[in-house]
Amino acid sequence: MSGSPAPTAGTPWRRALSVQGRVIGAVLMRELHTRYGRENIGYLWLIAEPLMLGSIIALLHSGQTGHKGTINPVALTVVGYTIFIMFRGIVNRAEGTLHSNLPLLYHRMVTVFDIAIARALLEAAGTFVAFTILLSLVIVLGFADLPARPLMLLAGIAYIFFFSFGISMIIVGGTHDNRLLERLVHPFSYFMIPLSAAFYQVSWVPEPYRHYLLYNPFPQMFELVRHGQFPSATLEYVDFTYMTAWTLVLNLFGLLAIRAVRRRIHLS
């Protein structure tokens, strides 16, 4: 028997994941340079855009009183809207993904998935930093306390990210050669604002409308986010199995969509 250790089956997987990570990182940096320029000040817009939007919406709600609970409306708006910006950014940026990045597919190691995930991660990173800054500000100003359940807060944000990413992959695959679907992307993201429960708690919605609303998993994800941030928020309207099933199905269809569109792309 040889004294040297046998090669592990996981080594090729680790090597493949390492290569995949480097490719996604390179695509992400290219996207960052393309969108914001190579000057350091340009990168600030990645954070400044959601930061300004979230601040304006929070100021609009600053004069309101609480609604059936102890959650401050400014804190409720900051938590809801800044995270909704992540959804909107990931979904809206998915339109035209392939048109603007087609030359990358000449490289054998770059896939449609790499381009899609790099864009989504860039949007999520900028929004999360803006969310952290705004939340810290409202905590310092006394509008909110520190997150009551930080892991639940992060879990809710993760659910929304993967939910958004699944939809974005479907959009990448469906809009590449379909102008009609391409024009529906932005209206869809605006249509989701009232259906997301980003600005209100599900408990505020009267029956039977609440029952119908909860067929959409998106409000449940925002309920999970609020449960993570606010001590008084509960998990009464959160079904983890339902949210997970929706997220997995959307990502499965998304992967099938980008696989199908890759076969329709002809590089000259």
Image (cartoon, grey):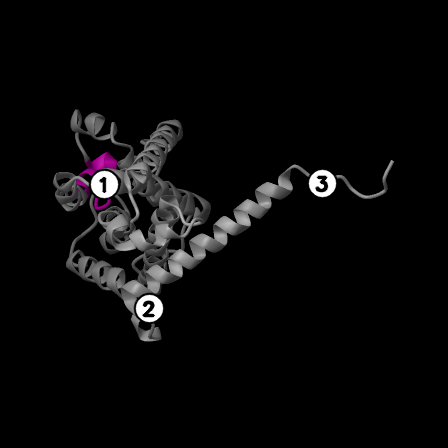
Taking the spot 25% from the left edge, 40% from the top edge, the residue there is 171
Residue holding disc 1: 197
- SS under mark 3: loop
Residue holding disc 3: 7
Percent of width and height locating residue 9: 65, 37
Kind of residue at badge 2:
Tyr
Q: Nearer the viewer, residue 230 or 66?
A: 230
Taking the spot 49% from the left edge, 55% from the top edge, the residue there is 22
Total labels drawn: 3
> Of the residues under marks 2 and 3, which one precedes in the sequence?
3
- Report the span colored magenta: 191-204
Residue holding disc 2: 43
> Of the residues under marks 3 and 1, which one precedes in the sequence?
3
Percent of width and height locating residue 32: 34, 63
Relative vertical location of residue 221 with respect to residue 59 in this rendering, above or below: above
- SS under mark 2: helix
Q: Is 151 one of the magenta-colored residues?
A: no
